[in-house]
Structures are given as C-alpha cells and as structure tokens.
Amino acid sequence: MSVDAPGRPAARPPSERLPRGVIRYQWVYLWHWPIRTMHWIAALCIAVLVVTGFYIGAPYFLTAGEPSGHYLMGWARFLHFAAAGVLVATGIVRVYWLFKGNRFERWRALFPVRKRDWVNLGQVLRAYIFVHPGRAPHYMGHNPIQQFFYTGLYLVAVFQVVTGFGLYGLAEPTGFFFQTFGWVGPLFGGWQVVRFLHHIAVWAFLIFIPLHVYLSVRADVIHAESRLSSIISGRRYVRADIDFVDEGPGVDTIPVEKHISRPELVVASPAGEHVEGGRTEDGIPDSVKKLTEEPEDAAAGEEDEA
C-alpha cells in the first residue's frame, strides 16, 4: 500500500474511499488441502490416543462378566495402536509438505531456523505477555512463538510414537516392533520408566490443545482475520495496510473489504503500532478512523487541485 508519510496511508480518490467501519483486507491462501486434512485427522487420532491411553494405564471403569465376553481392554489397545499408526501416516504426509508446500507450509516457516525469527521472538513474546498484539511483528503464517511450540509438540509426538511402539512390542518379543524399538527400554533405564515417561508426555498435548483453541478463537475475535476457519478453508484475512514479515512473491491473495461490527476490537494501526482505542465523537475508534478517513491535509490537497 502506498503512503504519503511513514506509517500514514496515502489519500484515496473519492471513488475509492471506504465507509466508516469498513477495513480493506487481503484473503490469503495459506494451507493446502492435504495440510488441513492431516490436521483434523491428527486431532482425531490424538483424542483417541488420550482416551484409550488413560484407560490402558489405569482402567477408569470396569465391566461385569468374563473379560472374554466384552474384550474391552483388547479393543482399547487395538484402537490405541491403530490411532498411533494413522498419526504416523499423517506425520509422513506433513514431512512431504515441509519440502513441497508453499512458503507458509515449508520447513523454514514451521521451525525457528531463520535469524529474523529469532530476532522477532522477543518482540512477539513481549506482545503476548503484555497483551499488545499491535506491537509485535506481523506474520501471515506462524510467528516465532508458534514455531517454537509446534517444533516442541512435534518432538513430543515423535517421542510418544517411539516409546509407544516399544511398549507395544513387549507383547511379542520376537516380533517386528520389539526388534525395531527394543532399544528404547535400556536407553531410559527400564520399561517401567518408559511407561511412566510415555504417560507424562501426553500432558504436553492436554496443556497445548486448550491453549491452541483459545488463542485461535481470541485472534479471530480481536483481529477479525478468520485464523480459526483458515484450517478449514485454507484462507485467512490479513489487513491490507500492514506489512507482514513472511509475505512475498507468489502469495495467492484476493482483495476484500469487510465491515467490522465491533471496530473497537481492531487494535493495529496502519504502521503496525498499538493504538489505545480512543473513540471519536461519532463512536468510531481512532484506530479504525485512521483507516477509513483520509488525512485532512491530503483531502485539502485534493480540493486545491480541483
């Protein structure tokens, strides 16, 4: 977007001026359908793994009659390891898209490997802690904190798969799983230790998932950018007047204009700085009025030219 001065939008011709409460966005295509599909399949697998895993570790209800009559523990074990196998399959697909996906899906955008992301990490962290999202560098895809959390979660998932398949192999010491993952027990000092660590590590998912859902919903409410629905449609709205760290050539965007019913929740100014949300006499916050009205000197300049 062109500017008349640093951090100040250029005046638009009268035919292009937006009504008050309307903000110009770009509808950006972030996630291809394989990424979205694997995300939801993985979420379902994790839910099955958590429920059946806790039951295998400490059955929280029992059934009457002979065990052979209902085979509840057997079904729990089967569902647990079947879900683990499907989760591994989704991981293989995700690894493929780390190299074949777009700029937001590749490994450089998912893992914190770029110097600029390390530099921006502190700014993003301060914005999270002090709840000033407008002061942080803006990312279309994953910001540095998300990169660190997702990297950690992937490492926990790999740990769970390796230890889980090792525990599964105990039922058949001559089978494939024990022959492949039998080294896990001696590495951690015994299978009982492996079982304990496998149980403890699942709490990383139980802590992460509520935070993940909450922050996604909160971002939708505050920024009106459809981040939550982007994992369904593949697209999210981003402000057209803000520079994003990870934008670049080849990004599939569609320009749109959105009416913001609660503009007081839009907290980022055109320069990407935080605006404290003061209101004008007509009830429109200053942060939105800066976007929807032209500067007085620019409007005066147009009148002089006319």
Image (cartoon, rainbow, N blue to C red):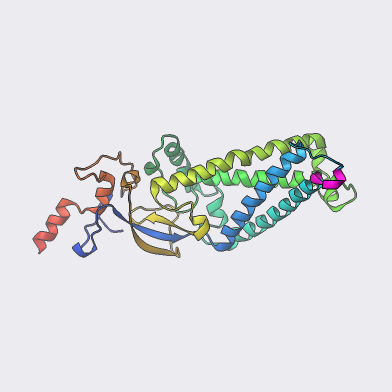
The answer to whether residue 159 shows anywhere in this view is no
Q: Is residue 272 left or right of residue 235?
A: left
The answer to whether residue 105 shows anywhere in this view is yes
Q: Residue at x 39, y 48 (%)?
A: 223
Residue 146 position within the rendered picture, expressed as x and y whole percent measured from the top left: 52, 45
Outermost residue, right direction? 174
Between residue 35 and residue 284, name the one nearer to us. 284
Q: How would you classify the magenta stretch by its main secondary structure?
A: helix
Residue 299 position within the rendered picture, expressed as x and y whole percent measured from the top left: 15, 56
The region drawn magenta spans: 67-73
Residue 240 position within the rendered picture, expressed as x and y whole percent measured from the top left: 35, 57
Q: Residue at x 49, y 56 (%)?
A: 230
Whether the magenta-drawn stretch holds residue 167 is answered as: no
Which quarter of the rendering shows the N terminus? bottom left
Whether the magenta-drawn stretch holds residue 70 is answered as: yes
Q: Residue at x 59, y 62 (%)?
A: 34
Between residue 264 and residue 180, name the one nearer to us. 264
Between residue 46 and residue 68, name the one nearer to us. 68
Residue 156 position within the rendered picture, expressed as x and y whole percent measured from the top left: 66, 43
Q: Residue at x 82, y 37 (%)?
A: 191
Which quarter of the rendering shows the C terminus? bottom left
Q: Disc count in the image?
A: 0
